[in-house]
Image: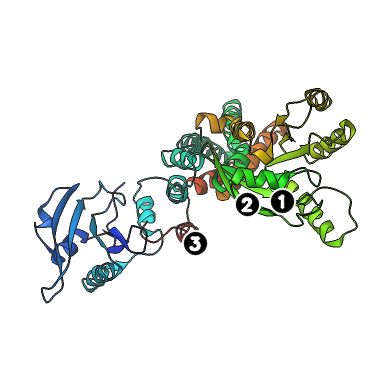
Amino acid sequence: MTSLQLEPIAALATAPGIGAIAVIRVSGEGAIEVTNRLFKGKDLTQQPSHTAHFGLLRNPDGSIIDEVLATVFRAPKSFTKEDVVEISCHGSEFIIRQILNRLMQEGVRLARPGEFTQRAFLNGQFDLVQAEAVADLIAADSEASHRAALTQLRGGFSKQLKALRQQLIDFVALVELELDFGEEDVEFAKRDQLRGLMQDIRRVLRPLIDSFTTGNAIKNGVPTVIVGKPNAGKSTLLNALLNEEKAIVSDIPGTTRDVIEDELFIDGIRFRLIDTAGLRQTTDTIEAIGVERTQQKMRDASLVVYLFDGVNVTPDELQDAILEVRASGKPYLLVGNKADATPDAKRQTLNEVVGEPVVWISAKDAQIDELKAALSARVRTDATVQTGSAVVTNARHLEHLVGTDDALAHAISGLDAGISADWLAMDLRLALKHLGELTGEITTDDLLDSIFSRFCIGK
């Protein structure tokens, strides 16, 4: 693809605010020439790509704005595949404004949010899934979210889907050809081969669709709700996990009447911890609202930590509580508190009643290492987290993956029912449309504006 050289744009590429260094990016037709008119040093127009040059930036009257380092990137070997100059200056807000003003005086336009990445996409640097991964990579605040974004940026699932889409296009062309010979009852697209291809595509799609729950949790944090009876030690546990007095701790049952949330990183995974009101029947109106919110948080959570008091709980009470947790349908961990004060015999009895692993802790003494390890392991049991395989973290991607899968499922059902080529072609076109919009091979200006407007300015 031939690179477009659009009008030159400029923006601050580093975070705004005072700092030691700031980088201003200039990209587009004449970017090197425009920068060179302000630059006192080597002639930038004569310098090879990927070279950095020290010099001065001056005002029209000759006064110095700053000492800078100008790095030249010539098309198409740049991020945007256009001519690019990155100006490294001192991180003074005044200096940054002066440089941007001088560039605008020379005909450079201030870039819109995400416009550099949008130009990179339009110039074929990467597809739309990879372009969106740039924003995810910038926003990544954990090892897992960084790994997921990097996998997408390096091609992820989009390259595989593009290859399968091309094969499907070839079949659609044959089906369309059959329509031109409708009266002659010819079959150019072998139905068994077409069915096999659609099944192959669905085998790729289904794990990606199923990965969204994990992917969304990786990107936004794993919503982890701590539930249990009043005085089980939920607030004490939250404080121990966060290593601060976040929640009020009291021997009085029902102290926590609203949800308390904070974040914790364990082994590179971000957990959104939610402390809740104790689960029990109550006549207290305010506490009842808190219990209802607890139940709602359980429904919304990706992981439930059920905490029980090993000293005071009875086997029957624990059995009833576990049935309630299981009924939520959410992944859960069973955590026994007050391990130091619970007799070994009772711990063994409770373990046998539960019939599944129990993590024993002492929240008051912050003896919670086993729980942290269990939380990490519970998330990492997903193969996509273990292997670094592509996961879906974007709701737009999920929408088109599901749309493609539905269209292909409908087409396969149609083949089994012996539908005509024109109806089959409609389902195949819909599948192609979803795949094309996913990777950016089919786009609209509104779609691109919506995606790239969410990027930061300068990227």
User: Is the residue under label 2 in contact with that under label 3 (CB below 8 Å)?
Assistant: no
Residue at image mark 1: 249
User: Is the residue under label 1 in contact with that under label 2 (CB below 8 Å)?
Assistant: yes
> Of callouts 3 and 1, which one flags the residue occurring earlier in the amino acid sequence?
1
Q: Which amino acid type is shown beneath numbered disc 1?
A: Val
Q: Is residue 401 left or right of residue 102?
A: right
Q: Nearer the viewer, mark 3 or mark 1?
A: 1
Q: CA distance from mark 3 to mark 2?
A: 47 Å
Residue at image mark 3: 446
> Of callouts 3 and 2, which one flags the residue occurring earlier in the amino acid sequence?
2
Q: Name the residue located 23 percent from the left edge and 58 percent from the top edge.
A: 87
Q: Is residue 293 left or right of residue 100?
A: right
Residue at image mark 2: 245
User: How crowded is the residue under tag 2: few (<14 C-alpha within 10 Å), some, or many (20+)?
Assistant: few
Q: Which amino acid type is shown beneath numbered disc 3?
A: Asp
Residue 429 drawn at (x, y percent): 57, 45
Q: CA distance from mark 2 to mark 1?
A: 9 Å
Give SS at disc 3: helix
Give SS at disc 2: loop
Q: Which mark is residue 90?
A: none
In the displayed structure, 423 sits above or below 57; it is: above
In the displayed structure, 166 sits above or below 116; it is: above
